[in-house]
Image: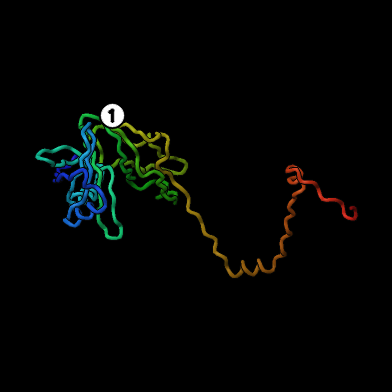
Amino acid sequence: MISNETVEAQPRAAESRGKNEARRVRVTGSIPAIVYGAKKDSMAITVNPKQITKILASDTGHNTIFDLQLNGGKEKVMIVDWQYDPIKSRLLHIDMKRIDMAKAIRVSVPIELVGESAGVKQQGGIMDQILREVEIECLPSDIPSHIDVDVSQLVFGEVIRVKDLPHGGKLKFVTDEDQAVAHITTVKEEVVATPEAAAADATAAPAEPEVIKKGKQEAEEGAAPPAPAGKK
């Protein structure tokens, strides 16, 4: 999905890469980044982490296509990888790819279930979503933020598969079309022991121990059968 967001970037010297240099960049309030693709050389740059965080937190997340302003020009890019410090809750580094708007690309988009299924509402089942993302191929301008699938008619015994997901001719599925997306499962009942049941178990006769027959197995493994008692 194309955004109106513009991220300003500053070039870094290629020889300035490294942990120490990355720390110095972060001290200034920026984060190190790399931009590559579109048959151009990769470039080491710095960007504002607040702008990148805003994009990643949007509805389209890392699938967002935005403008990168660098050296007086703009080019369409997409975030393809990022490093995040979970302890300090901050971005450390990102990779961006230049996007050719005239060429199809592959991306993963989330699947959202819409409606309350008949299997849940009328049959007392539980909705089980097996697949939460699907990989598609389409032009950059046709990337959806998510794919909605209506589950209101889903009942026991039926399965929604990738091929059942709504889509137009602008995109095609890369994920196996027979892969299951969602189905209705049953509620597992938990058996709670009552005092009466516990007392009945206590008075019940102990079960006969199971005799494990090993002779055949040992013979098959080549082990000699034990000698009869009293013989040497």
- Tell me which residue sits at (20%, 32%) in the image: 101
- Please state which of residues 192 and 176 is positioned toward the viewer in this rendering: 176
The amino acid pointed to by label 1 is Gly
Observer able to see residue 1: no
Observer able to see residue 15: yes
Q: How is the image coloured?
A: rainbow
- Please state which of residues 182 and 144 is positioned toward the viewer in this rendering: 144
List x then y, in percent, for residue 206: 72, 64
Which residue in the protein does label 1 denote? 169
List x then y, in percent, for residue 23: 23, 55
Q: Is residue 125 left or right of residue 78?
A: right
In the image, farthest residue toward the front: 15
- Tell me which residue sits at (33%, 43%) in the image: 111
List x then y, in percent, for residue 112: 32, 45
Decide: few, some or many residues near mark 1? Use Cα within 10 Å; few <14, some 14-19, many ≥20.
few
- Tell me which residue sits at (39%, 34%) in the image: 177
Secondary element at image label 1: loop
Dividing the picture into quarters, in which one does residue 106 lie? Answer: top left
- Tell me which residue sits at (44%, 51%) in the image: 124
List x then y, in percent, for residue 104: 26, 31
**How many numbered discs?**
1
Q: Is residue 202 left or right of residue 103?
A: right
User: Eyeballing the image, is 197 above or below 96?
Assistant: below
Q: Is residue 114 left or right of residue 219?
A: left
Dividing the picture into quarters, in which one does residue 1 lie? Answer: top left
In the image, farthest residue toward the left: 72
Q: Is residue 18 left or right of residue 216?
A: left
